[in-house]
Structures are given as C-alpha cells and as structure tokens.
C-alpha cells in the first residue's frame, strides 16, 4: 500500500494534481513536502495506534482545504474522519485494498473485527466512490456487498522501476547449471504457501527455486528443504532472506519464470507480479478464488493462472512442461511487459483515479436548506412500515425526509431509501433520542429552519403535520399529544413528573413534535445528549433555555393505542420516577446561542 501510494502521488503531481498524504510513521529528514507522518505509539492486533492522528488529520484538512479525501483501507486511522465535521463536508473516495480476513485460529482478531466492522461499514456508507483493485476481489468481497452500486475497479499499478535502467543480472554462478531458474518473493508466512513450491521443486533435477524474503516460517521452511534433499546433494531450493531493492531486481532480471502459490485472499492482488512483468518475466500463480492475482496473469496473458491451490503435483507437472517450452516462456514475458506498460503503469491508474475524484464531486453534500423543513424519522427494524410512511410524506408534498436507521437488523434503511428518503446509519446503536439528535444535528448543519419528528411504526398520521405547524406560529416547540395510548404504568410515571417539574403536558414521550430553529440549536448541543432520559431531559433543557412549548391534540393509529415500549413493569416506573426526580433537582446550566459545529 505504501509503495503504491508513493508512486501514485508522484504521478498525480506530474499530471497536475495537488496531492498530499497523511500516513503512520516517524518523520524522516528526506520526506517530500507532500508527505506527513504521524508517530505510532503501539500496535494492537496488527493495527497501528497513533494517538495524534485525529489532530493531524484535522490540521491537514484546515491547511490544505482538499476537494476530496482519498482513504485507503483496511486502516483503522480512517475512522477518525467519521468524528470530524470538517471531514464530513468533503467527498470521500475509499480505496479498498483488502478485506479484513479473520482466521478461525485467531480469536483476538475475530473479536476485534466485531468492533472494527461497524466503523468500516459506515466509512463505506459515507464514501461517494469505492475503488477495488480487481473484478474478482470485488465480486468476492463480503464487506463490499452492500455498496457495489458505487464501486469501480482500478487495478494497482507502479512506475517503471529505476533499477530497470541499469540493472545487472545475477551471475550464472549463483544458479545451478542446466536447470529452469524459478524465483518467488514474499514474506515467509502461511498465506504465501511456499511449502507447495518447495515440495514441487525439491529433488527435481531440471528445476531450481530461489525465495527472497524473511518471516516467521524461515526455520520451518529451511527444515522442509533439507528433508526433501537427498543426502550428499546440494539443495535446489534456497532461501535468500531479505535483499536490497536493487538486488531484488537483479534476481528478477536473471530468472526464467516467477512463481506465486499464495493460498489465502490476504494476497489480494500481488504487486510483485507487476515487477516481474516489468522485467518481461512469465508468471505462474495459484488459482486463488476471490484474489486479483490470477486475474492479473489471465488478462495480461503472461503465464499460468489455473494452478490449484496447494496442489504440489499440479505445480510440478506445469513446471516440468515449461522446461521444454522456452519460446512459450518468452511469449508470456513479452505479453506481460506489454500489459504492464498499457494497463498497469501508474500513469493510467492516476488518470482513472482523477475521474473517480470528479465523479465523487458530482454528488455533493446536500444543499443548505434555509427556510425549509426536515421530516425526521428515527427507525429500528421498521422495514414493514417505513416505506409506506415515506411514500405518504412525499405524496403530501414533504420534500426533505431523513430516516436515521439505528443499526436495524432488517432492511429498514434499504426500504426507506428505495421509497425516496435520505438515510443515515450511525456507527454504533444510539437509542431513540440519540437517533433523534443525530437528525437534529443534521438539520442544524444543513440550515433547515424547522424539524418535524415522527415515529417510523405508523403511529402518527401524516395528515396531522399541519396541526403542528399551525400551532408553531405561537411556539418554538409543538408536541403532538395523544395520551389515550398510555398504559396505566405510563400514566403513573407521567403524573409524578408533572408533579415535581410543574409541566402541564399530557403526553410527555410523544415522538411527534415540531422544533423551530431556536430549538434545533439548543438540542444539537452536547448538553441535550448528557441530560437525555426518555425525553425528559429534552423538555427540561428547552424550558431552561426559555423556549415556548405547547401541546396540541392529534390523532394516532388506533391499532397501537395502549402500546408502551418504555414502561413495561412497575420496576421501570420506579426507575423513571427516581431518575426524573434527580434531573429536576440537579443544578445544571444551558449555554444559549453557542454555535454548534460538531457533526
């Protein structure tokens, strides 16, 4: 990812884009002006933790004023953008390098991904465009399944390596004479499946294999080589360890073919294949379903791409065949070099990327809606009713409808969006008021002058909205009251609150309300979050701010009269009475007319 990003930004600068990068790491003396590094304090389950990343991102956005945020994933630092109003005002393009693959043997990673996934999905939700590196990876990616409508494929690419200009091949003395010279490069780890290559080549008089790289399996692989080498013979497989960049290209220039036997989708693309193709070397890869690796070889006609994963005999048979086909190897190498220049060179990638940036900018943040009204509907598992409600609102002439899908387990968000509403889905479950406040903050940010809140389950009649708006001529807040729905326990709880608070409202937890701009400003602030409890804190904070509240009777769907989702036991009533008592007698202040800027 880092090498690709460096090549991409260099090329973007050549093409006239002002590109900058914010990455993990300690600053280096020779860092270019476009690069900013954020020191990492620790790594937690393979994820770098840099406590200063959010501040660095905020500073970069403020100073650079970017037109697009290009976010590379997997990358936990990307999640900071979800918490920043300045980031939300910019279109996002997500570059999807790989899924987070969770091995059944790694319980800590499985647990961590349960926390990671909601944030990952919300980044994808916010993104205007998602770039995947190959069609097979896009087709097989479960995390991208919901977002394919905004995905596109741009293969990874690279600059022609500088080492190619003056590279010298490794001397013939470094290879065993008379044998097909095979090379593989990568970290000595399980998903590279070097075991298959070693077993396919070991003991074969006409084959030899060099492996560049280091890793945790070095000792195990060395022992495997020795076990399959006849006594008194020199091994025809050699682990070279890490080598310098220039020396790596020397090995590539001197081999007859390049091999990759990777067995897991962690090998999402195989950038080293492009390096081999740049040297006009044929490539042999495993037929790894869902990886872009066989696709790269197949579409460039640069080698074999159908070798079964982990099948030692299939690899041996293929290599045996190639020993006697030098012209075929040469043809594959030439095809690969041609494909590298035409399809996998960084210049083509940068041009395609620019087009995606432009496409992202064509779908800007919604216009500021001064003078307009927002219909706000928090929803959780309401797929059965939400579509009908949105349609009824649109038919009644309500243009701006926002559904806050509070992590529904059904298709609430999908149904609402299909019906014509705008849908947002919070990163984590928020609860009734949390979802409501998210929508109110949205209204404040986008300049709406009023908000009408409704339940998603069909309790409130769309035809009653004018009743609220008429009453709003004389109040900042209007509550649609239908106390007939209340259960006995709910009535007891409300009576207690009216007694200690002095409110004369009859329907304290009605979700059918009108808020004007002054009320929106108050309820968008953090204090409204901290004081929330069954809407009681909301009423107290509005009264403390000096806003006028009125209650008007409205009709409701009689099917749901008497249904209570809040007071379902006398214990819950007792907790309600205790909590509301503490809230009424606590000392707290409400800052008024403070500009709200958080998202």
Image (cartoon, helix red, strand yellow):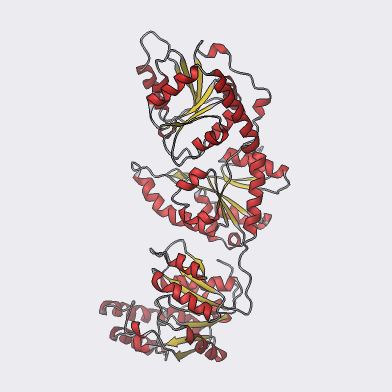
Residue found at the far top of this picture? 232
Residue found at the far left of this picture? 570
Q: Quadrant of residue 596?
A: bottom right
* Front in this rendered view, residue 5 or 423: 423
Q: Is residue 442 visible?
A: yes
Q: How many marks?
A: 0
Q: Is residue 175 above or below residue 487?
A: above
Where residue 485 appears, x then y in whole percent? 34, 86
Where residue 127 appears, x then y in whole percent? 55, 57
Q: Quadrant of the C terminus?
A: bottom right
* Front in this rendered view, residue 415 or 41: 415
Where residue 174 appears, x then y in whole percent? 53, 14
Q: Is residue 31 visible?
A: no
Q: Is residue 1 above or below residue 505?
A: above
Residue at the location (49% across, 72% down)?
A: 437
* Front in this rendered view, residue 32 or 440: 440
Residue at the location (47% across, 37% down)?
A: 267
* Front in this rendered view, residue 142 or 247: 142
Q: Is residue 88 above or below residue 302?
A: below
């Amino acid at each position: 990812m880092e090498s690709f990003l460096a090549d991409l930004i260099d090329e973007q600068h050549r093409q006239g884009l002002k590109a900058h990068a914010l990455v993990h790491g300690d600053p280096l003396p020779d860092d270019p002006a476009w690069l900013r590094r954020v020191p990492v304090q620790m790594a937690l389950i393979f994820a770098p933790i840099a406590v200063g990343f959010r501040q660095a991102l905020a500073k970069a956005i403020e100073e650079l004023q970017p037109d697009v945020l290009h976010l590379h994933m997997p990358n936990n630092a990307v999640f900071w953008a979800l918490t920043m109003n300045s980031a939300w005002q910019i279109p996002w393009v997500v570059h999807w390098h790989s899924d987070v693959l969770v091995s059944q043997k790694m319980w800590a990673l499985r647990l961590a991904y349960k926390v990671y996934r909601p944030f990952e999905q919300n980044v994808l939700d916010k993104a205007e465009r998602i770039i995947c590196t190959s069609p097979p990876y896009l087709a097989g990616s479960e995390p991208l399944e919901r977002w394919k409508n905004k995905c596109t494929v741009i293969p990874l690419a690279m600059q022609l390596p500088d080492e190619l200009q003056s590279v010298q091949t490794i001397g013939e003395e470094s290879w065993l004479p008379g044998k097909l010279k095979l090379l593989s490069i990568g970290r000595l780890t399980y998903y590279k499946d070097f075991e298959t290559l070693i077993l396919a080549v070991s003991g074969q008089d006409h084959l030899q294999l060099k492996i560049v790289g280091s890793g945790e399996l070095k000792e195990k692989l060395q022992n495997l080589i020795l076990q399959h080498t006849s006594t008194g013979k020199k091994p025809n497989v050699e682990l070279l360890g890490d080598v310098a960049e220039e020396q790596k290209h020397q090995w590539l220039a001197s081999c007859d073919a390049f091999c990759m036997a990777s067995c897991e989708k962690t090998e999402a693309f195989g950038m080293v294949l492009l390096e081999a193709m740049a040297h006009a070397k044929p490539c042999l890869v495993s037929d790894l379903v869902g990886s872009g690796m066989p696709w790269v070889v197949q579409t460039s006609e640069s080698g074999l791409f159908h070798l079964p994963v982990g099948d030692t005999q299939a690899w041996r048979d293929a290599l045996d065949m190639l020993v006697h086909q030098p012209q075929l190897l040469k043809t594959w190498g030439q095809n690969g070099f041609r494909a590298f220049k035409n399809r996998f060179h960084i210049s083509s990638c940068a041009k395609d990327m620019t087009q995606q940036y432009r496409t992202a900018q064509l779908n800007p943040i919604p216009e500021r809606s001064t003078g307009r009204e927002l219909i706000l509907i928090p929803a959780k598992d309401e797929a059965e009713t939400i579509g009908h409600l949105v349609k009824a609102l649109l038919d009644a002439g309500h243009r701006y409808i926002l559904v806050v899908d509070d992590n529904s387990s059904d298709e609430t968000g999908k149904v609402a969006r299909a019906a014509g509403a705008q849908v947002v889905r919070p990163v984590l479950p928020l609860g009734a008021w949390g979802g409501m406040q998210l929508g109110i903050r949205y209204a404040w940010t986008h300049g709406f002058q009023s908000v009408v809140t409704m339940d998603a389950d069909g309790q409130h009649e769309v035809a009653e909205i004018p009743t609220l708006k008429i009453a709003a001529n004389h109040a900042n807040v209007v509550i649609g009251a239908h106390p007939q729905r209340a259960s006995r326990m709910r009535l007891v709880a409300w009576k207690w609150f009216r007694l200690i608070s002095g409110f004369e409202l009859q329907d304290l937890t009605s979700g059918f309300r009108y808020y004007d701009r002054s009320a929106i400003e108050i309820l968008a602030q953090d204090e409204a979050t901290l004081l929330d409890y069954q809407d009681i804190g909301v009423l107290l904070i509005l009264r403390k701010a000096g806003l006028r509240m009125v209650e008007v009777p409205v009709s409701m769907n009689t099917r749901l009269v008497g249904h209570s989702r809040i007071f379902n036991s006398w214990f819950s009533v007792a907790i309600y009475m205790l909590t509301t008592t503490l809230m009424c007698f606590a000392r707290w202040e409400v800052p008024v007319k403070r500009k709200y800027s958080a998202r």
